Amino acid sequence: MSNKICEKIYFDEISPFIDGEYTGRSADEIIGHLKSCAKCRKKYESLINLKNIISSLAEYALSEEEKANLTAMIPSAFRSVRQKSRSVWPRNLTITLASAASFTIIMLAAVVVFRFFFLSTTPTVITSSAPAAVESDAANEVAKTELEQETMRADVPTGETAGELMTAETVDFPVFINEENFYNTANFKEAKNIIETAEKLYQKVGSDGSITQQELISKLKDSLASAQLNSDLIPDIFKKNIERIANSNKDEIVISESTENLLPFYAEKATYEGDNSLIIAYFLKPQKDLNYRYLLVPVANSINTGNIQDIITIKK
Amino acid sequence: MKYEQNINSLCDEALISLVAKRDNHASTELILRYQDKIFNFSMRFLNNRDDAFDATQETFLRMIRNAAQFRGESKFSTWLFSIAANLARDKIKARKIFIEISNDDGDNEIIDFPSDYDLEEAVTTRIDSQILIDTIGKLPMKLKEVLVLCDISGFKYEEISKIVKIPIGTVKSRINRAREQMLRTLKG
């Protein structure tokens, strides 16, 4: 490969390549080059490691109080929509309250100045109704503001939630399937069949007890431990993840979103929605001349199912 | 009741159309679905919890107020993150903490790799996460936002292009530059 093409790949194409964004050159061409060019391969490994590390950073979590505050502001947000639609109102409630407060302060200041001026010059007519009326207006504004705030508090739903948001706690990387032509329909259908079988297997865990979840997981771990991943294009960090899964004592494997973000480059995602579970499988994209084992890792997504755990099966 | 029970099975786009009709439950569901993602994005971008929470809250306020303006021309998540990205950008500008080296706006940086530059050593698989966070934090704003959207929020280039409102080619080059800059910084 000419130096110009090498430079182009090195400077411009490896980064989008690891994001699964192919522009111009095909994946096969880039992979072929990476196999033959140590410099580019080093850069590729550095960038994929960097991406993996960034993606694996612990996610920041909102506190329960902060989450409650977010949903609690919905009524006031809707109220501000109504106010907006009247067009003569300020754009949002904050501005409304700020305006009301400013108006109140100005009016109170006016009363103080007026009284001071009036008392110091014509004390005998202080009982005039004019300042009292102004003060009354200001007090009304304060009361109005307080009433508005009280109404907001009253509108806040108590203990009302639409469900728990799933949070993935562990970051592990699965092993993938490799086939010559994953994208052809027959393979995809086969993949779907395997996923369906996996779900049926899983259901046996809960129904007839012919297989336990522990056995399922154990089967996975054995297969993973014996898997031969001999491609120099699988970065070490992923191999370590695979090892970690195989040696893990955990009974479930959860793929976090951050890890999932890495998958488009390495794997194609397929989903199968069963009666009570959503199973997601990842398949390694075919890479020419590489002799992978044929591995499949469907992972049940436990959103809204509660009792569905991860299922992993392997086909050789 | 049936409706309330099933609302979490609706797609985002269906929910936002309900929000436009002032549906409390749809709003709650969308907030629950995206609160952590938006907060995480804001935290990575702003590196300050109070600011990130404010930005998250304001994002959802704007989502509700502008729900009727969502036309379905892009995915809901793209639309929502474009609101969040705008707010995060505004907050950084307001704080004036963003320091651009030599007024570099991130678009014209020339990457020069010395011949002995060992990229393999530049990034090991174990980097102190705080160092990494600091390194991301020091990136120019324009590079940081595309990197965070790509590597942390998981958007494709086309979606990032819509969120940040720049051409896909610019997304690609900015992500590339962000990574190069990080590698160099991490190498020290």
Image (tube, rainbow, N blue to C red):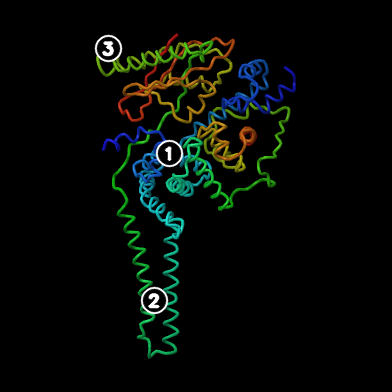
Cα gap from disc 2 to disc 1, whole angstroms: 48 Å
Q: Secondary structure at mark 3?
A: loop
Q: Nearer the viewer, mark 2 or mark 1?
A: 2
Give percent across and percent down for residue A176.
48, 17
Chain of residue at mark 1:
B
Residue at 62%, 17% in the rendered image: A31
Q: Amino acid at mark 2?
A: Val
Furthest-right residue in view?
A3
Q: Nearer the viewer, mark 1 or mark 3?
A: 1
Determine the image quadrant of residue B145.
Answer: top right
The residue singled out by tag 3 in the image is A210
Chain of residue at mark 3:
A
Determine the image quadrant of residue B121.
Answer: top right
Whether labels 1 and 3 share one chain = no
Chain of residue at mark 2:
A
Residue A60 in sight from this viewpoint: yes
A107 left or right, relative to A161: right
Classify mark 2: residues with Cα within 10 Å, few (<14), some (14-19) or many (20+): some
Disc number placed over residue B102 in the picture, else none: none
The residue singled out by tag 2 in the image is A134
Q: Secondary structure at mark 1?
A: helix
Give percent across and percent down for residue B115.
73, 27
The residue singled out by tag 1 in the image is B34
Sooner in the amino-acid sequence: mark 2 or mark 3: 2
Q: Are marks 2 and 3 in contact (CB under 8 Å)?
A: no
Q: Nearer the viewer, residue B36 or A35?
A: B36
Q: Nearer the viewer, residue A124 or A308?
A: A124
